[in-house]
Image: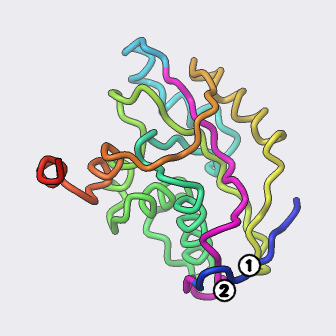
Amino acid sequence: MKMMKFFQVKGWIDVGKLGPVIMQALPPYPLWGIRLPLDSGVRKTLVSQFIENRKDESWLLIGKETLCSDEQIWIAWLGLQRRKMQDCMRSNSIDGEMLRLLSGTHHVSAGIKRAGVSESDAEAWIVKIPEYVGDGTIPVCELAQIKEMAVELATKISAEITDSRPTPTVEGLIRLQIISPEEVSEID
């Protein structure tokens, strides 16, 4: 696995023992957009099928509107690594902790509800949480190899891989409770 050393471009972000990280020039995060099946019967069991078929808890499903950028998920990944090192995760699993961190809440159940896949979602993300090697680097993942596993997982849950990448949306800000629907109408 190739590694990328941290360096400064615009400023530092304090991530505890992990050291400073930049907000630009980060590698793409290992995630793939998926189009979910239309069948509501399949959607009801989608998450449990995914959990049953994944190799380990380093694979997770995230609701499409939850992610705004690769930088956002890398920062959540750094927070996850710090919490693992300090043995202070609130969730019993790394996938639950990642959803909680992406949601910006202290409550695991609220994090899963906000960032996880819901029955009404038409699209989602298959995400691989990379290993941290503990030397102050962010991994540059072998995306082609990881994508093969993501495609296999998508097939097992009757989903289709898309070419999308995370972008901010108003729906995502509402879902994460960063803004309320009322605030959106005030802006319009």
Residue at horizontal 42%, vertical 44%? Answer: 116
- Amino acid at pointer 1: Phe
Q: List x then y, in percent, for residue 160.
A: 60, 21
The CA span between labels 1 and 2 is 8 Å
Residue found at x 56% / y 82%:
13
Closer to the camera in the image, 148 or 5: 5
Quadrant of the drawing holding the N terminus: bottom right
Quadrant of residue 80 within the rendered picture: bottom right
Apparent side of residue 82 relative to residue 40 in the rendered image (left or right): right
Q: Assign the magenta stretch its main secondary structure.
A: loop
Q: Is residue 103 above or below residue 20?
A: above
Residue 126, quarter of picture: top right
Look at the image and give the residue range highlighted in magenta: 13-36
Answer above or below: position of 132 versus 102: below
Q: Which of 107 and 115 is in front in this view?
A: 115
Q: What residue is disc 1 on?
A: 6
Query: Mark 1 falls on what kind of element?
Result: loop
Q: In this view, does 185 lie to the left or right of 163?
A: left
Identify the residue shown where x is 66% and y is 53%: 29
110 left or right, relative to 96: left
- Residue 134, percent from left and from top: 76, 77
Query: Local crowd at mark 2 within 10 Å, few (<14), some, or many (≥20)?
Result: some
Badge 2 marks a residue whose secondary structure is loop
**Which of the two labelled residues, at mark 1 and mark 2, occupies the earlier sequence position?**
1
Is-magenta flag for residue 7? no
Three-letter residue code for mark 2: Gly
- The numbered disc on residue 19 is 2
51 up-or-down from 101: above or below: above
Q: Are there few (<14), some (14-19), or many (20+) residues within 10 Å of tag 1?
A: some
